[in-house]
Image (cartoon, rainbow, N blue to C red):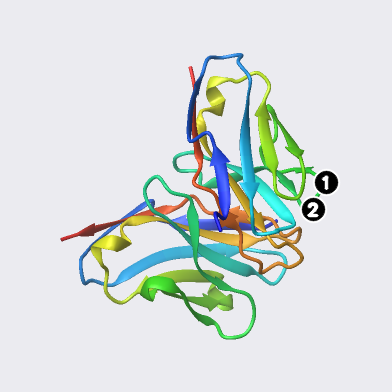
Amino acid sequence: NAGVTQTPKFQVLKTGQSMTLQCAQDMNHNSMYWYRQDPGMGLRLIYYSASEGTTDKGEVPNGYNVSRLNKREFSLRLESAAPSQTSVYFCASSDGGGRYNEQFFGPGTRLTVL
Amino acid sequence: AQSVTQLGSHVSVSEGALVLLRCNYSSSVPPYLFWYVQYPNQGLQLLLKYTTGATLVKGINGFEAEFKKSETSFHLTKPSAHMSDAAEYFCAVMDSSYKLIFGSGTRLLVRP
């Protein structure tokens, strides 16, 4: 059981470049999430998918798009990267269906935009 | 709207000393509260959670937290710090749409 996996682990982009962060979970979870972590700000939700086929905006969605490819995979795309998107990105998943369900996190992707 | 405040971005304790990390929340619905730990260069791992029932919640690695509704607090404690406890700790509250709202985090430093 790998849990939640993310690729790549590190990435450096130039302003204006695009890229897709990949996330996959093998726990048969319904819900998946993308967060960004910035110093002193905790984790902020970018987008989430409550179930396969649905996606919704979180707290900081501007500049990002997502795709719930299937139940296992949830990708995050930066169409035109900006220095303000330099951050550590975490994907998470949960069983959904209840307010007490634990979210399981991937190891993160460290993104630097020059 | 739900929110979480963690007092102290850095807390330093000696090995063997009491660990106390503070968390206060604001919630318009009965709160479901969580503590996560993040070790360097890793993702977040659940330490413990409060949903309903007993207000003193025990978690992994000897940590526990007490839900105090009157104080809107959910402070994390451990009687005796170990070097391996050095990490960043996040308090979170779940909102009415099942999304987690995180505090800004507290970095715990453990001195030998």
Residue A17 at what x, y percent from top left?
A: 60, 15
Q: List the single residue furthest toward the left.
A: B112
Q: Residue at x 51, y 28 (%)?
A: A86
Residue A72 lies left or right of residue B76; in this view the side is right
Q: Residue at x 77, y 45 (%)?
A: A70
- Judging by the rendered image, the residue that carries numbered circle 1 is A54
Q: Quadrant of the N terminus of chain A?
A: bottom right
Name which residue type carries label 1: Thr
- Element type where label 2 sits in the image: loop
Q: Is residue B62 above or below residue A50?
A: below
Quadrant of the rendered image containing residue B54: bottom right
Quadrant of the rendered image containing residue B96: bottom right
Q: Is residue A74 above or below residue B14?
A: above
Is disc 1 in contact with disc 2, using a CB cutoff of under 8 Å? yes
Disc 1 versus disc 2: distance between alpha carbons?
6 Å
Whether callout 1 and callout 2 share a subunit is answered yes
What label does residue A51 carry, if any? Answer: 2
Residue B66 lies left or right of residue A60; in this view the side is left
Name which residue type carries label 2: Ser
Q: List the single residue furthest toward the front.
A: A1
